[in-house]
Amino acid sequence: MSSRVLAADLLKHVGARVRVAGWVHRRRRLKSVTFVVVRDRSGFSQVVLRSGEAPPEETVVEVHATVTANPRAPGGVELTEPVVETVSEPALPPPFDLYRPAVTAALPTILDHASVALRHPALKARFALSAAAVRGFRSTLDALGFTETHTPKIVASATESGANVFGIDYFGRPAYLAQSPQFYKQALVGVFERVYEVGPVFRAEPHDTARHLAQYTSLDAELGFIRDHHDVMAVLREVLAGMAEAVSPFDVQVPEVPARIPEIHFADALKLVGAPADEPDLAPAHERALSEWARREHGSEFLFVTGYPMAKRPFYTHPDPARPEYSNSFDLLFRGLELVTGGQRLHRHEDYLAVLGAAAAEYRDYLAAFAHGMPPHGGFAIGLERWTARLLGVANVREVTLFPRDLHRLTP
Amino acid sequence: MSSRVLAADLLKHVGARVRVAGWVHRRRRLKSVTFVVVRDRSGFSQVVLRSGEAPPEETVVEVHATVTANPRAPGGVELTEPVVETVSEPALPPPFDLYRPAVTAALPTILDHASVALRHPALKARFALSAAAVRGFRSTLDALGFTETHTPKIVASATESGANVFGIDYFGRPAYLAQSPQFYKQALVGVFERVYEVGPVFRAEPHDTARHLAQYTSLDAELGFIRDHHDVMAVLREVLAGMAEAVSPFDVQVPEVPARIPEIHFADALKLVGAPADEPDLAPAHERALSEWARREHGSEFLFVTGYPMAKRPFYTHPDPARPEYSNSFDLLFRGLELVTGGQRLHRHEDYLAVLGAAAAEYRDYLAAFAHGMPPHGGFAIGLERWTARLLGVANVREVTLFPRDLHRLTP
């Protein structure tokens, strides 16, 4: 049996008999001929069928045919004198036409029928882009001496934030799904200095919004021996540049990552958007206004907002030594939305004991690393789906998640 | 402030004042001098302290000193005229001496104090090796046109195998932790043809053995347009070669992956080990005997056992068309243990309806992909911890898991 030729390689085989395999993407019946477009992972090939019936769309076929140059055919070749064999049964019609250039179905239809809907080339391409971005994340950090880790997703207590955790029956004992690898990545700074993890995180998010999921993919990094959060921001800048470069072959508006991403302190940000000085956080409208300001004033689609009030950050956040009501933390805004959260963490055991007080006993395992010597450290977490959604300009993170999970959706 | 120099780079700075930072790995007090070995992510540097007290082991320090060549010092240099600053508080003593070449603690001590114990260079190295192996897995599959995916870890039903699943409270509804990405990776063959995923899988494993964990890292791959399971085995062979090459810089006995891994049919394997012809599976002792045979007869540390009886494989397994009581499946034995399971899957919708019968309704979401045209396909799953354990020759998978989860262990 001749080996299979991919659609993208057909031009190299003009004049030869080849074997092509894929899905019937589209049938077009003309008077004396039927064009059958076959889709494979590399692209499309056009089969010229002069007799017989073409199988229905999405049927898997194998085609033995001659590669014939034809400048008017897509890709410059077509497959003539074909013998078409049906490999799957004739397929049921998909929930919407996968061959139309635009996706005509509404989001719930796409999500309910994901395993078929995702075959649409425009939907499928989103996930190839997402995979490339993750590759860029990893390769940048590998080059910077980071070690990849895999940490527990089942944890004994809901201590990290206390809210929005999923409970599990763990051999008859209560346990929880991890909301982030935060505690583990910090402990592992004590082992490897620089670590990252790409993995699922779980939020029992009771709100049904366009930017929240019950499970999403978090790109986490943490590093030791920093001076303050600016060293973390410098690594994040490299990571973003690596992720942007990785998606440059795709048909998206790839952002330019400035050599130095502009930065504004939280207190100045409030003034800039005209918010009261005692606001504890930025509203979505503020984030959009700040992003617009960074674009206008600095020509940057990225903006660091630093120094969020301690009151709004988790207990392990390191304060700004000069202004202890503010923190050594940051958010990164990208095209109007918060994309990354990060900052410096406390690293002295006594500082943890002071902020936790009587609750310290519940954090015994976490605190062990600090009692045994930890360097100043910090890190960040990028929400993969948010990054991909911003790049593609889609409004809902569900559109860039293969099989999303949320308040209402547990299948498929 | 001068930038930090890593221990591994000190030789390039002989004669200069430098800043080194890390953990006090060991203090050795002699009559007129104390040697302080500082550990960082690159290795060790020896500080020559002529006065003052060295901080206790595991304290984080910053050392400003002169790099002085000394052929008798480890690495050929030592740090003289040092100014040692303590960055963390003086550290509590670790649960066992981290500076001794051999790990002197028992496994439960290591696991109970993982965040400190893993700092031992011999333990830490295991996870650097594991990370390299995963890098080899991904880069091999990337080069073969596979797309990386992230699939749900929370699923609506325990349909894949029915047993050993963890239950979750999902917004008041029952749900389960995914035992594998099996159903999703098959559906995604319909989208991308070739997919892989590196991620956690969950087994409510009621047995407390050296080879089972409640959460482990599964390296999953699945590909379409195969002839039979031999095409899957050929890809697995490439993956193993890539993973072996990736760990070649490490101090382990890297296996040679033969161009063609030897293969024995299940029925012949039973004969070879002298087991009754109606045995439905291989016992661990059989696996060891078969591995030994492959080494002796074929000079290979790897052996494919193919054609396991259909009765012992999951419902989606493709039968051997010539001998339908046997399957187009395989296990890969490596150094006496099962390391990988894989095979060809059913791809016709009607075949699924036939094997599932009345239960088909429960599998509606899974079966949708097949009703809409699926190619012949198959795949495999490598247990990362088993692979690393075999490479390192350690007996228990917990020794190659950062923070293991099992029947008794939910912390740290």
Image: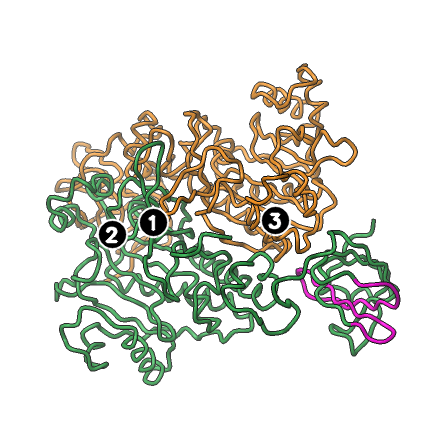
Chain colours: A green, B orange
Say which chain tag 1 marks.
Answer: A
Q: Which residue is mark 1?
A: A181
Left or right, A262 with respect to A23, comes to left
**Dot 2 lies on which element?**
loop
User: Which residue is denoted by mark 3 in the rendering?
Assistant: B367
Residue A286 at what x, y percent from top left? 27, 77
| Amino acid carrying mark 2 in the image | Ser
Circle 3 chain: B
Could you tell me the amino acid type at mark 1? Pro
Report the residue at 61% width, 58% height from top: B191
Q: Can you tell which mark lies on residue A271?
A: none
Residue A292 in the image: state x and y as whole percent. Answer: 34, 81
Q: Secondary structure at mark 3?
A: helix
Q: Secondary structure at mark 1?
A: loop
Q: In the rendered structure, which amino acid carries the disc numbered 3?
A: Leu
Give the total of numbered labels: 3
B213 or B261, nearer to the observer: B213
Residue A33 image point, x, y percent: 85, 72
Mark-to-mark CA distance, 1 and 3 = 34 Å
Q: Which residues are magenta?
A: A29-54
Q: Answer few, some or many: residues within 10 Å of disc 1's Cα (few below 14, many 20 plus, some between 14 and 19).
A: many
User: From the image, which quarter does the C terminus of chain B lie in?
Assistant: top left
Q: Nearer the viewer, mark 1 or mark 2?
A: 2
Q: Chain of mark 2?
A: A
Q: CA distance from mark 2 to mark 3?
A: 39 Å
Q: Which mark is residue A161?
A: 2
Asked if the stretch drawn in magenta spans residue B360, the answer is no
- Say if mark 1 contacts mark 3, CB within 8 Å: no
User: Residue placed farthest to the front in the image?
Assistant: B358
Q: Viewer-nearest of labels 2 and 3?
A: 3
